[in-house]
Image (spheres, rainbow, N blue to C red):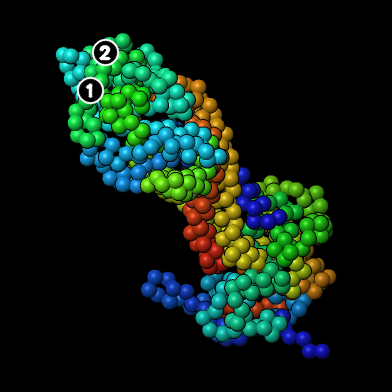
């Protein structure tokens, strides 16, 4: 049976207003993401990597073009439906980890499951399993401020996987990590992708991410300059 | 894990700010509870005092309702004793007191002074109205009163008379002629209102009837009920029974008669309403500032929660929940504070200055009125919800990418 691609972006354009000036961030970008892909979006600062990631992750709306999620046009979705779609099918990993400071590691991971209505016992069990999988079996009850950068990013990865997403969007996930930790985190994400079929889409400057990617999309001045599978 | 859980954690994280806001709410609540309790107590005391003066109901001649007499007992109720016995038969009635209102001149032979007189049936009057408690010297009237009279302390001072002194009372009879009787001062009373104290005189119905040559006619029958709840039913029954017996009777309610009570009540409600409004505005402004700061500080967190799939309504409810939790905690502390202040005030013995026109101050008493606490709680809850709503809505409407990029 034919299965729709995970994400199809067609003719995406987005510009920002900076005072009176209108600065185009991406121009007529077309991109398809399939299951299990491990993609690095690379390019110089201002090339539109984060903007494209935000549009594909339904965090922002394009000025032009469309984003289809499994064939469903995201433009037709209400704000609540977009929220539900992010909750159920997407995971996000941020450069600054963006953990909820008042929640423990376990609670951070359980949060998206609570949004999805997973029962407390089940989400507790899954949160613990995920934390164990990212190597934080001894940090369930620890608040983010007591974790190292690498540990925080591991919690963020576990959180991103909480609702068994089809794709994880990661914006510069290694930028705030030391070299060794960055390697570990990347290895972990690749391993998860390989084992569970979750697609990963990175916006990155980091050559280590690019080196591990199975597909590298290069952006320049808001347009796709190259799209290479390795 | 739900919105309240997360809200509680955030409040605990911002301990100092939450404590500050909780204190504002606590003071707001305590002010409502204490002021409400004090005012309700004052209303109750005023009401009791008013009913004690005018009774629950009064029976008057239909012509007397809403009109002033031009001559003594012009609108008097004839055959007052019969009307009294009919009224006394009603099961809701506790006491029926005849009263004769009249004006006259009191003279000690050297000096004369006008007075506002009232003829009463002494023993039932003393029992029902606790008139004896007003006596500052001597005693209240008793039996049928005989030739005894009691004077307001101001009138007695004006006439330079004391206990045992004799006065000649002069008054116009209903037919317009002048009559006089001698009377003996047996007591001095303080009726608490200075102007009335300077003119007040009371004697037995028999003495006053003799003076006015108006046997059997009374100005009104003052009726005390066993329970205030019976007022409507008793008024209807009395009206029917008296009119059936041929009396052109009109039943007046105490609220109609006690105009002072209504005026003071409106004044207090006005003052309390104004102070309450100021209080609510202060709490709203404080809470709005605190919640706006919280939204600004947590902009990035809002972006994260939205990215993870929290709906805009979820974000709004999160901040509203913080407002509601602050209201609950503040009210709890406020209730404890209000009860403590109430205990201190009631034990302090502080005497408030006399009300306008009154001669005596009264000790401050703040009663525990659950309704005042409920109103305080509801006010703070609504206030905090309203104050939190706009910052919460702003948080819910924030573009996700802007929130995530917030530094």
- Position of the N terminus of chain B, as image quadrant, is bottom right
Measuring 30% from the left and 25% from the top, which residue is drawn there?
Answer: B210
Mark closer to the chain start, 1 or 2: 2
Residue B282 visible in image: no
Farthest-out residue, bottom: A1
| Residue A121 position within the rendered picture, expressed as x and y whole percent measured from the top left | 81, 57
Measuring 38% from the left and 20% from the top, which residue is drawn there?
Answer: B145
Report which quarter residue A202 is drawn in: bottom right
Measuring 45% from the left and 34% from the top, which residue is drawn there?
Answer: B96
Mark 2 lies on residue: B166
From the viewer's perspective, is B219 left or right of B133?
left
Measuring 67% from the left and 71% from the top, which residue is drawn there?
Answer: A84
Q: Nearer the viewer, residue B249 or A62?
A: B249
Mark 1 lies on residue: B180
For label 2, the crowd category at 10 Å Cα-Cα, with few meaning under 14, some 14 to 19 and many 20 or more, is some
Report the chain holding disc 1. B
Q: Secondary structure at mark 2?
A: strand
From the viewer's perspective, is A20 left or right of B89?
left
Residue B383 against residue B150 in the figure, above or below = below
Report which quarter residue A129 is drawn in: bottom right
Which tag is nearer the camera, tag 1 or tag 2?
1
Q: Nearer the viewer, residue B371 or B142?
A: B142
Report the chain holding disc 2. B
Residue B97 against residue A132 in the figure, above or below = above
From the viewer's perspective, is B143 left or right of A132?
left
Residue B169 against residue A35 in the figure, above or below = above
| Residue B225 position within the rendered picture, expressed as x and y whole percent measured from the top left | 50, 37
- CA separation in Å, label 1 and label 2: 13 Å
Farthest-out residue, top: B164
Q: Secondary structure at mark 1?
A: strand
| Residue B382 position within the rendered picture, expressed as x and y whole percent measured from the top left | 51, 52
């Amino acid at each position: 049976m034919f299965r729709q691609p995970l994400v199809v972006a067609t003719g995406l354009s987005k510009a920002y207003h900076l005072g009176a000036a209108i600065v185009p961030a991406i121009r007529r970008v077309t991109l398809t993401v399939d299951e299990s892909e491990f993609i690095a979006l690379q390019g110089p600062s201002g090339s539109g990597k984060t903007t494209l990631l935000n549009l594909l992750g339904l965090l922002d709306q394009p000025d032009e073009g469309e984003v289809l999620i499994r064939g469903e046009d995201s433009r037709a979705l209400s704000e609540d439906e977009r929220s539900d779609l992010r909750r159920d099918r997407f995971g996000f990993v941020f450069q600054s980890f963006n953990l909820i400071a008042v929640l423990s590691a376990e609670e951070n991971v359980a949060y998206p499951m609570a949004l999805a209505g997973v029962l407390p016992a089940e989400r507790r069990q899954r949160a613990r399993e995920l934390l164990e999988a990212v190597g934080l079996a001894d940090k369930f009850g620890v608040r983010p401020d007591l974790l190292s950068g690498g540990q925080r990013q591991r919690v963020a990865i576990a959180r991103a996987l909480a609702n068994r997403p089809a794709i994880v969007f990661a914006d510069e996930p290694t930028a705030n990590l030391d070299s060794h930790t960055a390697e570990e985190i990347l290895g972990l994400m690749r391993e998860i992708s390989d084992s569970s079929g979750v697609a990963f889409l990175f916006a990155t400057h980091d050559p280590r991410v690019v080196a591990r990617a199975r597909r590298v999309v290069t952006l320049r001045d808001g347009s796709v300059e190259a799209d290479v599978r390795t | 894990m739900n919105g309240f859980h997360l809200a509680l954690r955030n409040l605990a994280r911002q301990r100092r700010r939450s404590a500050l806001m909780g204190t504002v709410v606590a003071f707001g609540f305590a002010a409502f509870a204490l002021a409400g309790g004090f005012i309700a107590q004052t209303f109750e005391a005023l009401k009791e005092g008013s009913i004690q003066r005018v009774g629950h109901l009064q029976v008057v001649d239909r012509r007397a309702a809403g009109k002033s007499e031009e001559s003594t007992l012009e609108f008097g109720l004839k055959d007052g004793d019969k009307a009294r016995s009919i009224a006394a038969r009603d099961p809701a009635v506790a006491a029926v007191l005849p009263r004769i209102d009249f004006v006259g001149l009191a003279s000690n032979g050297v000096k004369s002074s006008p007075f506002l007189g009232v003829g009463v049936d002494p023993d039932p009057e003393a029992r029902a109205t606790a008139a004896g408690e007003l006596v500052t010297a001597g005693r209240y009237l008793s039996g049928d009163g005989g030739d005894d009279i009691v004077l307001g302390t101001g009138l007695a001072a004006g006439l330079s008379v004391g206990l045992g002194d004799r006065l000649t009372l002069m008054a116009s009879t209903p037919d317009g002629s002048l009559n006089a009787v001698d009377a003996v001062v047996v007591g001095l009373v303080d009726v608490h209102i200075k102007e009335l104290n300077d003119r007040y005189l009371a004697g037995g119905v028999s003495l006053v009837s003799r003076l006015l040559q108006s046997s059997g006619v009374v100005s009104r029958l003052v009726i005390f009920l066993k329970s205030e709840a019976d007022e409507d039913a008793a008024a209807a029954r009395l009206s029917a029974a008296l009119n059936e017996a041929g009396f052109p009777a009109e039943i007046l309610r105490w609220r109609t008669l006690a105009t002072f009570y209504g005026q003071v009540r409106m004044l207090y409600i006005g003052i309390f309403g104004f102070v309450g409004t100021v209080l609510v505005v202060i709490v709203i402004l404080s809470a709005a500032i605190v919640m706006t700061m919280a939204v600004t500080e947590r902009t990035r967190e809002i972006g994260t929660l939205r990215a993870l799939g929290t709906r805009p309504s979820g974000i709004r409810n999160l901040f509203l929940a913080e407002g509601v939790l602050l209201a609950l905690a503040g009210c709890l502390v406020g209730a404890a504070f209000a009860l403590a202040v109430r205990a201190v005030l009631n034990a302090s013995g502080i005497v408030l200055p006399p009300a306008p026109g009154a001669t005596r101050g009264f000790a401050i008493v703040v009663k525990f009125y659950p309704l005042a606490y409920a109103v305080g709680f509801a006010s703070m809850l609504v206030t905090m919800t309203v104050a939190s709503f706009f910052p919460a809505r702003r948080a819910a409407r924030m573009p996700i990418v802007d929130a995530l990029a917030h530094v």
